[in-house]
Image (cartoon, rainbow, N blue to C red):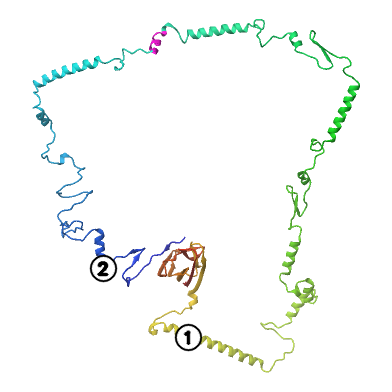
Amino acid sequence: MATVNKNFRVKNGLVVEGNTATVNGYDILTKASADQSYIIDLIGGTATSANTPNTVVKRDGSGNFSAGTITATFSGNLTGNVTGTVSDISNHDTGDLAEGTNLYFTNQRALDATSAAYDAAGAASAAQSAAEATAASYTDSVVNGLDTDDIEEGSSNLYFTNQRALNATSSAYDAAGAASAAQSAAQSYADNLVNGLDTDDIEEGASNLYFTNGRARNAMGAGTGLSYDSSTGTFSVTANTFDAWGSASAAEAAANSYTDDEINALTTTDIEEGTNLYYTDTRARGAVSAGSGLSYNGGTGEFSVDTSVIANKSYVDTAITNLVDGAPGLLDTLNEIAAAINDDENFFTTVTNSINGKLSLTGGTLTGALTLNADPVNALEAATKQYVDAAESAAQSAAESTAQAALDDVLDGTTDFTALDVNSVSRQVAATTGNIVTAEATTVLSWNKTDYRSAKILVKAKNGSHTHVSEVIATLDTSDNIALNEYGITTTNGSLITIDADINSGSVRIRVTPTHNNTEVMAHATLLA
């Protein structure tokens, strides 16, 4: 997007007739005495060379401060002599300060200061003996009160622990060797005993009893029609209990009747599908297909017509409508058209021959007799001359009027100028946005950037009972950068819009952004090529 330059430029000075002026909401200060006092008050007092607290200190003609004393917190480098008290000397040490009443430390001064407290040859020796005796006595009393809890273990005489005792007797047994060998021998012995055992070597318990024929036979029994001999384990049929022919026949009949009843009660739900398949919608739809001009959806079973192959009523109606194409009622059928050309199958040839028999406007040769009214050529020439004379007179009058108006605009009538048609270099346009419901950037006016490169625009915004009018001048450079100047802003109750410009798809756009919802904006512009 092109760069929008909205700077306001004034040549040869700006004169403001009024008491105040603001920039972005801030007052502009001037050289008036009141503004000078405001600046001095803002930075703290009156500019003076006197040593007055809370005031500006001026330099004298040599560039020095003539107030004498400056009290301040200083964090930079200071060149020159400083008298008075400073609060921070972190960049200095005692090497930079002369010794005053508080003397610096020296070894000799320390020795001299303590020489009065002892005699290095005698008193010190006596003091040492007394100190040793006191230390020995104190040490004895402390040592006598100690036990092994108070003494740290050394490297030789170690304290007793169970683990140390076990480690010391490890030579008496081989925990990793002998014990492992004993375990292996015991396991091997147990395995040999178990592997040689069978049921003859294991006594019978109270629960898991050994098998015997007697126990098996005693566990058996006989039902109706059977007898059982537990001593031999033999079953036999009891005579006259079963009728091999009668009962069997009755059983068969009952079975047949039961089977018939079960079969009669069956439905396809109870019978598994074999070669003969059951009906399903999916199978039925899968057995159907569509031909030319039809399409078929096997999922829904629906057919649809391909109107590009088969003409339906709507297609035919549309085709007929397109064929008629708004023809008048007397010519909207083939029969009416045929009647209109007198049922002439060679109508084109007939018309062509008729036209060929006429005299062309560009001239030609008449083959028959020509009868004219009295002097028609002279009458035609007279009418033509009268029309031309009137047109020339009107054109000359208009040109003279335009020239005179242009000359009147030139001082003294001596300035050279090139006469231009206003419409050839400029254009008047106007537009409105209508109601902008939501306050957002909206294009109020646009034009082709190749046709017009500059414009003077009057923009008006309305919101409720309030209005805002701005005059804007816009121009483009050869790189399509836009310079926009908004001035002459007049509002009844604060600004209602902000104005901007850009280039979009080859068009210059004047854009407005309302301050409030439901704002209407209109614009009138003079565009200049």
Residue type at tag 1: Ser
Residue on which disc 1 sits:
401
Residue type at tag 2: Ala
Quarter where residue 245 is shown: top right
Where residue 172 is drawn, which disc sits there? Answer: none
In this rendering, would 474 be left or right of 271? left
User: Does 165 appear in magenta?
Assistant: yes
Quarter where residue 144 is shown: top left
Front-lying residue, 135 or 436: 135
Disc 2 crowd rating (10 Å Cα; few below 14, some 14-19, many 20+) is few
Front-lying residue, 415 or 179: 179
In the displayed structure, would residue 272 be above or below residue 307?
Answer: above
For the record, the magenta segment spans 162-170
Disc 1 crowd rating (10 Å Cα; few below 14, some 14-19, many 20+) is few
Q: Position of residue 190 (x, y in %)?
A: 58, 7
Q: Position of residue 304 (x, y in %)?
A: 74, 54
User: Does 27 appear in magenta?
Assistant: no
Q: Position of residue 188 (x, y in %)?
A: 56, 7
Q: Secondary structure at mark 1?
A: helix
Residue on which disc 2 sits:
32
In the displayed structure, would residue 18 be above or below residue 188?
Answer: below
